Amino acid sequence: MNINLPNFNMKNLVKEAGSTISRVVQLTEEKLGTTERTEYDLHFQSLAERADVTKSWTEKIVRDTESVLIPNPQNRVEDFIFEKIDKSKPKRLSNLEHLALNMIEAGGDFGQDMPYGQALIKVGQAEQKLGQHEHDFIATSGICFTQPLRKFLEGEMKTISKERGILETKRLDLDACKNRVKKARSMLGQQAKDGISPEAVLEQAERDLRVAQAEFDRQSEITKLLLDGISTSQASHLRHLHAFIQTQVRYYKQCGDVMEQLQRELANLGGPTPYMPVDMENGGKSNSAGARGAGNNNSNSSHSSHKPNQSMPLQVNTDQMQRARVLCSYDAKDHTELNLSANEVIFVAECSPINEDYMYGKQGLMKGLVPRAFVEMLDDEHDVTL
């Protein structure tokens, strides 16, 4: 049986092994400080440190962004594999879409003419829309943000790392040549060895040093140019970041529109327990006061939510206050407002500066803001001094 063995060049193997051992010895001596080391200039060191920081943080940002967009790590691994083999990613239903399908199916089983069944179908349809917007958001974010950053890591940063590795090899070669020159100079005046005079050895070592120095300088300039290019890359990353934020803003706006429409549809369904819409522009609080006011006085069913800036001290003229009757009950939205009961009489005064939506009220020992639309002045002509 004929076995073809690969051709091994023993001389090359011995040479490479000797070179590797010499490198290990050289690096060990540098770590111990027993040999000289060529240091990079301060500008180069600053550029190299910035490159390391850029690479580290970009990797973290890409990883964290992908975790936000696709929380399931198994799905991320699958997408990565399909991307590497140039295959289209599998179409998956998101958790929202699974929920939507189950709600719609349950609503059909419970009865489309029943309040609960109707509501389930409406909510399921809204969840489907949210799921589609989520798909679009993930795809667009990948195109405008994570993919460009990953391309930077796999392209430019890999090139920089490769050139820095070559530069480090050139530096080790340069330091080795310097050591040979130093050793050759120390042997001047001694007898020739193997027919080669110390002067010839020194001449050859100096020639090798000049070549090593030239190669080191050339590689240093190449690496510096690549490191300087990181500033341009960061300017590009800033544009990608802006695009990502714009995509995120559009996504949340679309979701908000879907939920606003869903609230209107649920409120229109009515039923034994009607839906109470949430005021999304007022901290997500239920507009129960407005609904209650609608039962007592249709003309006062809502009011503007523009309040005096609570981060600034409230200035009120409390010297002259007027009596006012509460038209309909009102639940305070936060600690700055007063709870009001229909037909009770309280004292009110204008805020300073005057606010078109709110007045300052005094209810026994309690003080706070009251919505202007919920009170009726009783004695405009007779001020009450407190």
Image: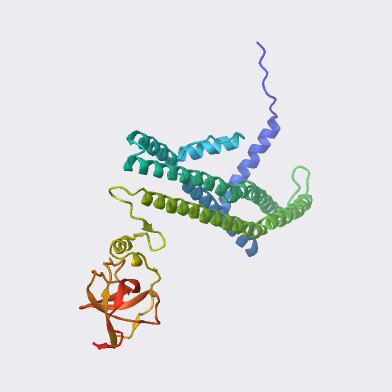
Which residue sits furthest top? 1
Using the rendered image of the protein, determine whether residue 300 is visible from the camera's viewpoint.
yes
Name the residue located 34 percent from the left edge and 72 percent from the top edge: 373
The x, y position of residue 144, in whole percent, is: 59, 50
Horizontal placement of 85 versus 92: left or right?
Answer: right
Quadrant for the N terminus in the image: top right
Residue 65 vs residue 231, the one in the foreground? 65
Residue 129 vs residue 121, the one in the foreground? 121
Name the residue located 43 percent from the left edge and 51 percent from the top edge: 259
Horizontal placement of 268 versus 255: left or right?
Answer: left
Task: Tell me how the rendering is colored.
Answer: rainbow
The x, y position of residue 241, in whole percent, is: 57, 56
The x, y position of residue 278, in whole percent, is: 36, 57
How many discs mark residues in the rendered view? 0
Quadrant for the C terminus in the image: bottom left
Residue 348 vs residue 82, the one in the foreground? 348
The x, y position of residue 134, in whole percent, is: 49, 46
Residue 145 vs residue 171, the one in the foreground? 145
